[in-house]
Amino acid sequence: MTRAFLLIVAMLTLGGCFQEPVMSLDPPVSVPFVTVEQGTSSGIRDARFLVVRTEKAWKDLWAAHAAAVTPPPAPPAIDFAQEMVVAVFSGERPTGGSRVQIQGVETQSRQNVIIVTYQQSDAPSGAMTTQVLTQPFHMVKAKKSEGLPTFMRRPGAS
């Protein structure tokens, strides 16, 4: 009888330990975005994942990006009161055939995050490619958010 009583008490106690959490996460909200610039030639040679929210930071990023062009073009106009720039630089590659593409920007306001999904692809192994250094990048502008950015690479591309 003591064993049965202890078993019932243990089941009742443990039953409360496996409830679902009370706090639920808000679903991500898709944010429309527009490409500012995309390509394979940049003065930025290392991998970078950035959210730019100020004019000064934008001018600094653009100067580094356009450093390989003479004369460097002026940075595209961004209204930083309403917009931000999201940028993915995949780093220098030894051949042509690489590309990076931002595929989505989402916000979760309760968690104060921005989720940026991107896909990066390289030329297939054994493919004929140009023997030139490339620096694939994609920069977009979207509605401004103060959330903490998270960059997620989507599978499917090499």
Image (tube, grey):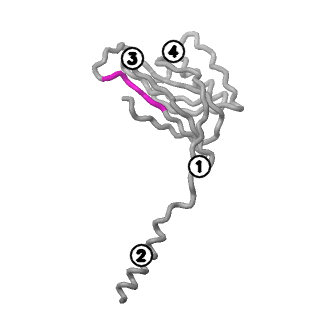
Which mark identifies residue 11? 2
Q: Is residue 61 magenta?
A: no
User: Residue at coordinates 54% horizontally, 17% vertically from top-left?
Assistant: 67
Q: Nearer the viewer, mark 4 or mark 3?
A: 3
Looking at the image, is 146 positioned above or below residue 18? above
Please tell me which of labels 4 and 3 falls first in the chain. 4
Going 44% across and 26% down the picture, which residue do you hit? 91
Give the alpha-carbon distance from disc 3 to disc 1, as whole Å: 41 Å
Q: Amino acid at mark 2?
A: Met
- Mark 4 / mark 2, whichever is N-terminal: 2
Q: Which residues are magenta?
A: 118-124
Q: Is residue 121 magenta?
A: yes
Distance (Cα) linking label 1 and label 4: 43 Å
Instruction: Indicate which disc, 1 or 4, sits on the residue closer to the N terminus.
Output: 1
Helix, strand or loop for disc 1: loop
**Residue type beneath disc 3:** Gly
The alpha-carbon separation of the residues under discs 2 and 1 comes to 33 Å
Q: Quadrant of the C terminus?
A: top left
Amino acid type, label 1: Asp
Q: Which residue is mark 4?
A: 68
Neighbour class for label 3 at 10 Å: few (<14), some, many (≥20)?
A: some
Tell me where residue 108 sits by quadrant. Answer: top right
Name the image quarter holding residue 149.
Answer: top right
Tag on residue 96?
3
